[in-house]
Amino acid sequence: MLEVNELTTKYITRFKEDVYAVDHVSLKVEEGKSLGIAGESGCGKSTLALSLMGYYFPPLHYTSGQIIIDGKNISGMNPDEVRRTILGTEIAYIPQAAMNALNPTQKVINFIQDVIWAHNPKMTKSDVYDFARQRFELLGLPEEVLHKYPVELSGGMKQRTVIAVSVILGPKILIADEPSSALDVTSQKMVIKMLLDLMETGLIKSMIFITHELPLLYNVTDDIMVMYAGQIVEKGTAQQTVFDPIHPYSKGLMGSIIVPESGLRNAKLTAIPGVPPNLKRPPEGCRFAARCKYVQPECKVHSISMREAKGDREYRCIFTEQQLRKDYENG
Amino acid sequence: MADKQRSCLKGVGLTKVFGLGRTRTVAVDHVNFDFHEGEIVSIVGESGSGKTTLAKMLLGLINPTEGEVYFQGKKRDISSSRKKKEYWKSIQAIFQDPYSSYNIFHKIDDVLLDCIKMRETGHLSHEEKVVLMTEACSFVNLKYEELTNKYPFELSGGQMQRLMIARIFLLKPKILLADEPTSMIDACSRATILDMLLKLRKETGMTLIFITHDIGLAYYVSDSVYIMEHGKMVESGTADQVILTPKQAYTKRLISDVPKIHEEWDLSTVTYSKS
């Protein structure tokens, strides 16, 4: 459904400095599958999302690599053309503050009309209304929301409305970038249920879910990809990555999970010391070397490529899986 | 070491009402609690449940409409600004947004020097003050030499939040109130901040009050947990009691809504609300 090969994109700052926020990222999402992207703030998760959609508006620039959506190569396409032909119809994007996309002076139904008419100007007003009503019913949203102004809706409701509108043109892939982080747990659960319903009913074929909240990611997606400083450091299924991480960074990340479950009170938390590197001048060799507990001099010499591990997994480290496991056992 | 049985902060029938007539809202409604010395307490609630209003009343930033706060067994008296300042020597706070917690015109040295001044340890020479500040900074893994002569906005969010903890390290209050201290930072830095707070509590034996919507965090750190719903305390008890065997329907729902990794996260219970 979506295939990305060695995608590299950069930001060019006002001072003509390059920031490589997405560096040689390859990924593949098959039909009916969902992929989760985890990582600290500033590791390039959201930039990756924008890059996947071909949304190259300054300061973001495309450098190299391929993006193939459903057999169609969109890399190097003019961003204005992408906006006309790809966004909304092939791939849809929900940012964290999606609810702010609603126009406060417009009723929700007018907002939907604008979206549909921009792509299909021939549809009549009553057809649009019927279509919107059916969609809302399918997704468990009450019909009266259509006649309301955004200020009359609660935060969770607004977020769900925007999600419903974002898939109204029938995109194949949905990218959800922290869609529930600004909501409380109950609304969060409703949003997640809605996203899973979308997958189940076939309204969207695949989903990419971005968040730094690992327990949530574990429950939502089939596969998880861990990002660090613009690079992917580990790829695997959700089960593998959360319970049996290979890369030292993933290991640290999983050690910081807090969940309210019995037996986990006062469990040891691992905090990763230090801060991520500055992507204007990324370090030579492994980007995680400066914060890694198991660092060796050779880590800092050559850039590290992904290597394969048992169970169709990949990770980016110079050590073998056995060596790393031994290190973890010894602390 | 502090006595775990002695009451440190107690509230009786604490109520706060905002507005009058049609806009009248009861933000906190006859809340009772008793925090012991050296205890770690969490006040958990969703947005709009009145937890921050309660925190402001505990800090003495707003006056309760009704009810009393007892501090160390005595009725709290903050009627004059001098008494208030005296009270603030015993209770300090860390807020959610580190960016708005500092005076942007004050350098970091001033921030730390103010804390030393508040301690009233008598006259200290400049060198002694620098030693204290260096110690406080190294406690939170910051380097004083790199911070001196800088303004707060030159630091990152995580660094600012850690500097907040350095302040607490210098002040050594009896009570620290942390209002959503980790909700604006990611899971990894959250572990660092929590580690530091718990280490500091171990050293000083202070009472730690967490105000949070993060049930995982509340369960992880606290001895006792209080659950708030629409201004009312609906449930309280030890962390294990409240989180693992909740009695109230509201608490049960809240806990079942948190994504888990070892137990199944049941999505079939979702009912779409009509608002």
Image (cartoon, coloured by chain):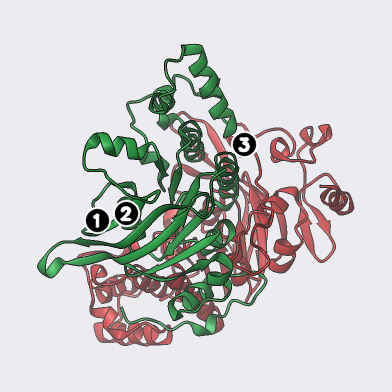
Chain colours: A red, B green
SS class of the residue under badge 2?
Answer: strand
Residue A1 in sight here: no
Left or right placement of residue B173 versus residue B11 in this view: right
Residue A6: % across, % down = 67, 51
Where A134 sits versus A90, above or below? Answer: below
Looking at the rendered structure, the kind of residue marked 1 is Pro
- Give the camera-side residue of B110 and A278: B110
Q: Which residue is drawn at 46% across and 12% down?
A: B126
Asked if badges 3 and 1 are on one and the same chain, I answer: no
Looking at the rendered structure, the kind of residue marked 2 is Val
- Give the camera-side residue of A15 and A70: A15
- Give the camera-side residue of B39 and A97: B39
Callout 3–callout 2 Cβ contact below 8 Å: no
Residue A212: % across, % down = 56, 56
SS class of the residue under badge 1?
Answer: loop
Looking at the rendered image, the disc whose residue lies closer to the viewer, 1 or 2, is 2
Residue B143: % across, % down = 57, 25
Distance CA(mark 3)–CA(mark 2): 48 Å
Q: Residue B50 carries which label?
A: none
Left or right placement of residue B53 versus residue A174 in this view: left
Residue beneath disc 1: B64
Callout 1–callout 2 Cβ contact below 8 Å: yes
Residue beneath disc 3: A277
Q: Which mark is residue B69?
A: 2
